[in-house]
Each structure stands twice: as structure tokens, then as C-alpha cells.
């Protein structure tokens, strides 16, 4: 089965927004085993829109259309699709009531008449409710047996509609089921992972293995085509076992959780508190941890010690250490972490000190040199990292590496 | 003049990466006064690639092609374009020497022979040097008078090539010059800006006004078509004056700088130091400030005081304040900012306390309620914000609003 993703919106063609819907739908198609061959973006223009819809219906089995379902005159995706398909439209009383209700509940100014345009449904379409907005989606099977899925443009409306309504429908069309599990890896890069698994990747048939590179992480998706989930798990399990043997502790989770969620969960399970002492990341590490809802159970206080004097005054880093080894040193990272744990009265502490650039690097201590200190129960470990990229990139990678180091220390 | 953007790469169709090149090129086209009508993404497949190139040449004046210029067998954009145009290719000795030199300098393993594929040039093409990689770009005028621009896919190679080589060429084609200036606005939303400027926007001819929504900001681009920069400035200046009268201090800059760069610059000019005391943002505010290279001149220390006891112990927030008004209160924000300035010995301080959600909200203090305290030279100001969105969104908006409040306080 082949798919095509059509995004409708002049704001995309003006470069006003990035088209993240296309990426989302592409990734979902890949997971469903549907081959996406084209992504096309077109503006709110009837002639050009009709042209790309015709081309898509001609060459693809499934056509996703998102955007242009709103109440304004510019929004003409539904009307144009109806014309291309040669179908009429009717007003759906339930949708109309829902729109009127929405305006009443949100206490918005009197509803403009053109909002009722959104209650029009293409003949023969299956209606997809939109609990996050007023424009419903539609799923249409054409006379030629093609499937057209019409969805609103805002990701906050499109994604839940796809996930809850469209995906189950598409799954029902595929002969078996696609069962997949994702291994999240931190500590080795994409090419390193590929090298370590080369023979397994080369020999893949069912299940398949697909690597996805993320900032400081690699996600490995193992997907099996099976008749049901049980068979899928049976196919996937030996492959995962093989990968685990090779990658070991570099795999930090197989659950639907981020690195920071994983770390906060680990700390909660161990009933431990954590603190942070940051120099070059300047608060980004703590900011990332605190983004986990409920982080307050494990995190109460953090230190941003950008200046050497502050490292000494607040964390108790020895003046001699700063003088002899400098702030960007193994010794300083160690004293920062120990000092932070003590000052905050926390069970664990992460410290970060490094050179994020673009200036400040020397031959001996180049841009990208970062020391990460981890204290768990009084014991301290320091990792030396040599990272590459822009200032922002080095800081982001440092945050990821610091969390990874801490979860490794906690697992021991 | 109309343009079409073709992105080539199976990794985009698999949802592995987001297509940011298309957005970049679209925005650049808009600034050049070129109408972009289509964005199309296709995989590394000769037949489908040839099809979309033909369609683009048929309906657009300028065709941008990015991706698929690398050394592997999968990379076939150049070869396919040559076939579609019916042109041959020749090996360019200078490019060949450059590639060999690149491999020697970077000390990489022996260069694989297929790297020389990158030295092949389409007959009649103007070569666009690529100082950031091995695959050069090309600019071709077809027999039908269309322009095809071939660029590498990685943004780090494509963007400099476009900016330095392609853009000046396209500018030379337009009758006059497009002169534009951008006003960056914080404190009012996109619809607020549109409302305040409705009559100006409705009456626009030359210059034109285009609003771009960013996280917590609106950028307003004023563009004039003129015979040269001086005439452009003369056309744009009265319009900018009119907009400034309406939006006043909501405009934070007209320079090429971010809010954090603007704030760090203001502090440097005033020879002042700053500190931060963060609760719900947990370090993100300081992390954002520190992302400005050279922030160490103004920022030495920050406080992450997530827990109430820490707010009291570290910042001296009164226990009575916490008991009577709670941590999310005007009073607490005030005491946090004053306490941070004192503890760090800084001239200025920003404090943040609020409810980022998803839990923790009440009828009286709902999710999104945030207090921002600003101290400048001992004087304190507190702003109450009611923000909407996910936990992450509320935290990002808070950081932006906090920096905006501080620059307003500094400007007084």
C-alpha cells in the first residue's frame, strides 16, 4: 500500500511555519508498513489544490490531506476535494449542534455564519470527530477504491485524530499486524550502532530494524509483521535479545519514556533525591529534569555556578583546585558534584563543567571538552566528553550525556 | 516569478527527519518576492524523481532541488536531472582535486572511488562551490528559460550555499531590489498585533507587512520593492514609524538579535550583572541567557529553588509569605528576586514562580499562572501572567516573558 501526504496552507509556502505534520504522518506510515512516496505542500488555491489531489489519487492508494478545513473563505480543501471526486455535500445536524455548542461554552463572541461551513460533509464520507477543535475530519473511499483522509491542519487537532481514528482503521486494512518495539540507546552514535549490528541489519527480513537518530540518542525500532501481537512479540523477542547482547547497558529503556523521565523514575523507585551543579549548561540540565511532571519528588534545588568564585563560595570547590587544574577539569567536576550533594542535602548530584564555545578553547582544552561528575551515596564518578557542534548543540549533548551517566551510576 | 521546492531523500519520507530546508527556502523566496506555489518531497527513486522534476519544470519558473548529491549509489538527483534535461555530464578537474584534497586534509580512510561521482558536472551548469562539504551545487538555465538550482541536502551545506551564491543571483534577476526590515515584538500575540495594525495591513501596497509568529514573539517584516537600498529605506522608514507609534515598547529590537542576545547586550552596555531565581522553569531561564556567547560578563550565578524550604533557606523568602500567600504569589516572586540579587551580589535579578502543570492547578491558581519578579538597582516589579499550553510550552513562554519584563525594566 502506498501513501501520499498533502499539506494545504499558504503559511507553509511562505515559510511561516515548519511542516511537522508531514514528518509525523510519514513516521506513522512507516510504522504501519505503508510506503509513503510523496509529500506535497500547496497553498489555499483551488486550481493548484485540485491538481495535486488529482495527481495523488492517480498514483497513491492512500491520500492524507491536512489543513484548509477552517471557517474562512480561504479554507477550501473540503470543497475542492468534493469537486474532484464529483460528490455533493450535506449539512450534518450533529456537527452543526456541536459547533454551536462549542461557541456557547467558550463564551466567544457571536458565532459568525461561515462557521457552519464546517458542518458540511462530503457524500459517503465517514466523519472523524474532532474533540480539539470545530472542524471534523473525514475518511472517504473513492469509487476507484482509493482512501482519502481529510484532517485539520493544527497538529494539536490532527495528531489525536490520526492516532485515535485513522490509525486503527488503517491497521484493520493490513493483512497482519505490525508489531514493533523501540530500544533507546545513549552513549554510542548512529554509525557506532550500525557498525556493532551490521551483520544483523544486513540479514534482517522479518522483523526489520530501523535506526532513528535523535539528539545524543539513537532509537532502534524492531518491527515484525505478524498475525497478532503475541506472534509479533515472539518474532521480535529473539532479535531484541541479540541486540541487547551487543549493546548492553547502552540501551537505557524499551519503554515509552524520555531519558529525563527514565532518570526521574529510577530516582523515585530508589527513593532518592538529586541536585545539579552546572557551569557551561547554565541551568539546562535542571530545566530538563524539571520538565518531567512530578519531578519535585526528587528534585528540590539546583546550583548554577558559572563563575569560579561562585564554585568556591557555594559548592566549596577548593581555590587550589581551580588554580592548579582550572574550572574545566576532572578535579573541579568531582568537587562540584560532592559540594552540591552536601549543600542541597541530596542523595545524588550531577555536576557539569566544560567549554561550550565558540570562544574559550585552547589546544589543551578545546571547545567541546566537558567533564560530568556524578555522586551517588557519597561515591563520585567523572566522565570526560569531547563533543562537537555549535554552542547550543554541545550544551544539549552535555545534558543528555550527564543524565545518561547518572542513570548508569544508579543502575550499579 | 514562481518557484517550487523539491526535497529529495527517503529519510524525509520515512519521517526520520523534519524538512527544515523547505521552510528556509520558502521564507527566502517570500523575502525575494518570488511566489513559492509548491513544496514536494520525493525519495531517492529515479522514476518518481524524474516525474516531479518534469512537473516542476512545467509549472514553475525556478526549481530548487536539494538532497541526493552525495557519493553513494542512492544519490541520483544530479544524474536524473541531467537525463530529464537531456544534457551530458563531464568531470571537472578542479572539483576532483578539491575532493581529493578534502580527504587528505581530514585524514579520513582512503577515499572510495565513488566519491569522484561528485566531480561530475551537468553540461552548461554554473558550479556553486561547497565550502562545507564535498558535493558542489549547480545552477542551470534550461533551454526553455527556467532556472534549476541543485543544492546538497544537509542544512549546514545548503543554507550557506543559498545565502552566498544563489540569493545574489536571484536578486540580480528581479527588476528592483527587495529591501526589508524586521521588527521583533514581545508582549502581545499575533492576533493582537493584527488588530492594532489592521488598517495599515489592509492598506499595504509597497512596502508590504508580513507577521511571523514565533514562541512568545511576533516578527513583523516590512518589505519594499525599490531600485536600491537607499530608496528601500526611504519607503520603509515612514511605515516603521507608524508601526512604532502603535506598538511602542512592545517592539524590543529591529536588529538581528534574539531576545536573550538583546538582554545580555543591554546589561553589558549598562555594565550590570544579573542573576536568576527559578521555580517552575527550573533552570531554563538561566540556561537561555547563558546560551549567549560571552554571557559570563553579566551572569555569574543562578538559583534553582524548586522547593519551598529552599526558597526560604537560600533566598530568604519569609516563611510567613509562603504560608499566607503560597509559593505561587506576587509576594513570593518579589522576595525571591530581592533575595537572589542580594545572595549573588548582582545589580539585577529575575525570579519565576508558577504552575506549569499538568497537575497542581486550582480554581484560584490555575495551571499557567506565573509570577515574574524583576529587580533592577533595588527596585522590584512583579508581572502576573496567565499562560496556556502544555507544561513545556508554559515554561518556554515564561522564559520569554521573563526576559521581556527585564528588558522593559532596564529600559526605564
Image (spheres, coloured by chain):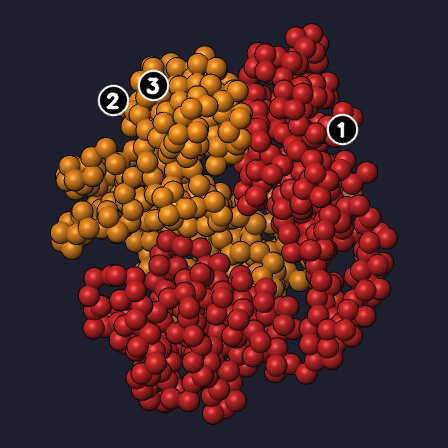
Chain colours: A orange, B red
Numbered tag placed on residue A376 in the rendering: 3
Instruction: Tell whether B234 sits left or right of B228.
Output: right
Q: Which is in the foreground here, disc 3 or disc 1?
A: 1
Nearer the N terminus, badge 2 or badge 3?
Answer: 3
Q: Disc 2 vs disc 3: Cβ atoms closer than 8 Å?
A: no
Residue A84 visible here: no
Q: Which residue is mark 1?
A: B377
Give the number of the mark in front: 2 or 1. 1
Q: Is residue B119 above or below residue B160?
A: below
The location of residue B36, given as percent across then percent down, is: 57, 71
Are tags 3 and 1 found on a single chain? no
In which quadrant of the rendered image does the N terminus of chain A lie? bottom left
Nearest the viewer among B186 and B314 is B314
- Disc 3/disc 1 C-alpha distance (Å): 41 Å
Q: Which residue is mark 2?
A: A412
Both on one chain, marks 2 and 1?
no
Look at the picture and state if B292 lies above or below A45. above
Name the residue: 70% across, 18% down. B335
Label 3 packing within 10 angstroms: few (<14), some (14-19), many (20+): many
- Identified at 37% across, 66% down, the residue is B133
- In terms of secondary structure, where does tag 1 sit? loop
Residue A152 visible (yes or no): yes
Disc nearest the viewer among 2 and 3: 3
Amino acid at each position: 500500500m502506498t501513501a501520499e501526504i498533502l499539506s494545504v496552507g499558504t503559511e507553509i509556502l511562505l515559510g511561516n511555519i515548519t511542516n511537522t505534520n508531514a514528518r509525523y504522518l510519514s513516521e506513522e506510515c512507516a510504522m504501519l508498513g505503508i510506503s509513503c512516496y510523496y509529500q506535497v505542500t500547496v497553498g489555499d488555491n483551488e486550481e493548484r489544490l485540485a491538481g495535486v489531489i488529482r495527481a495523488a489519487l492517480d498514483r497513491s492508494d492512500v491520500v492524507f490531506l491536512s489543513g484548509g478545513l477552517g471557517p474562512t473563505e480561504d479554507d477550501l480543501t473540503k470543497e475542492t476535494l468534493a469537486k474532484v471526486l464529483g460528490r455533493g455535500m450535506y449539512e450534518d445536524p450533529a456537527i452543526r449542534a456541536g459547533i454551536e455548542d462549542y461557541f456557547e461554552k467558550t463564551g466567544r463572541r457571536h458565532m459568525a455564519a461561515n462557521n457552519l461551513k464546517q458542518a458540511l460533509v462530503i457524500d459517503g464520507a465517514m466523519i472523524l470527530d474532532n474533540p480539539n477543535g470545530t472542524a471534523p475530519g473525514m475518511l472517504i473511499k473513492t469509487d476507484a477504491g482509493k482512501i482519502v483522509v481529510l484532517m485539520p491542519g493544527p497538529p494539536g487537532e490532527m495528531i489525536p485524530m490520526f492516532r485515535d481514528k485513522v490509525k486503527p482503521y488503517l491497521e484493520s486494512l493490513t493483512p497482519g499486524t505490525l508489531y514493533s518495539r523501540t530500544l533507546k540507546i545513549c552513549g554510542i552514535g548512529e554509525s557506532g550502532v550500525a557498525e556493532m549490528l551490521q551483520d544483523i541489519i544486513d540479514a534482517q527480513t522479518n522483523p526489520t530494524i530501523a535506526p532513528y537518530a535523535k539528539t545524543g540518542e539513537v532509537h532502534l525500532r524492531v518491527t515484525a509483521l505478524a498475525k497478532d501481537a503475541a506472534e509479533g512479540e515472539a518474532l521480535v523477542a529473539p532479535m531484541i535479545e541479540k541486540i541487547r547482547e551487543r549493546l548492553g547497558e547502552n540501551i537505557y529503556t524499551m519503554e515509552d519514556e524520555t531519558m529525563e523521565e527514565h532518570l526521574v523514575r529510577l530516582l523515585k523507585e530508589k527513593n532518592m533525591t538529586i541536585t545539579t551543579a552546572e557551569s557551561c549548561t547554565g541551568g539546562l540540565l535542571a530545566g530538563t529534569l524539571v520538565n518531567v511532571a512530578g519531578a519535585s519528588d526528587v528534585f528540590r534545588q539546583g546550583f548554577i555556578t558559572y563563575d569560579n568564585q561562585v564554585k568556591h563560595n557555594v559548592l566549596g570547590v577548593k581555590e587550589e583546585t581551580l588554580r592548579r587544574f582550572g574550572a574545566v577539569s576532572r578535579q573541579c567536576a568531582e568537587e562540584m558534584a560532592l559540594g552540591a550533594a552536601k549543600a542541597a542535602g541530596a542523595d545524588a548530584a550531577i555536576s557539569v563543567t566544560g567549554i561550550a564555545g565558540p570562544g574559550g578553547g585552547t589546544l589543551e582544552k578545546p571547545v567541546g571538552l566537558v567533564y560530568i561528575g556524578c555522586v551517588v551515596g557519597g561515591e563520585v564518578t567523572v566522565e570526560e566528553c569531547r563533543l562537537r557542534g555549535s554552542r547550543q548543540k554541545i550544551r544539549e549533548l552535555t545534558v543528555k550525556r550527564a543524565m545518561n551517566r547518572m542513570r548508569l551510576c544508579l543502575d550499579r
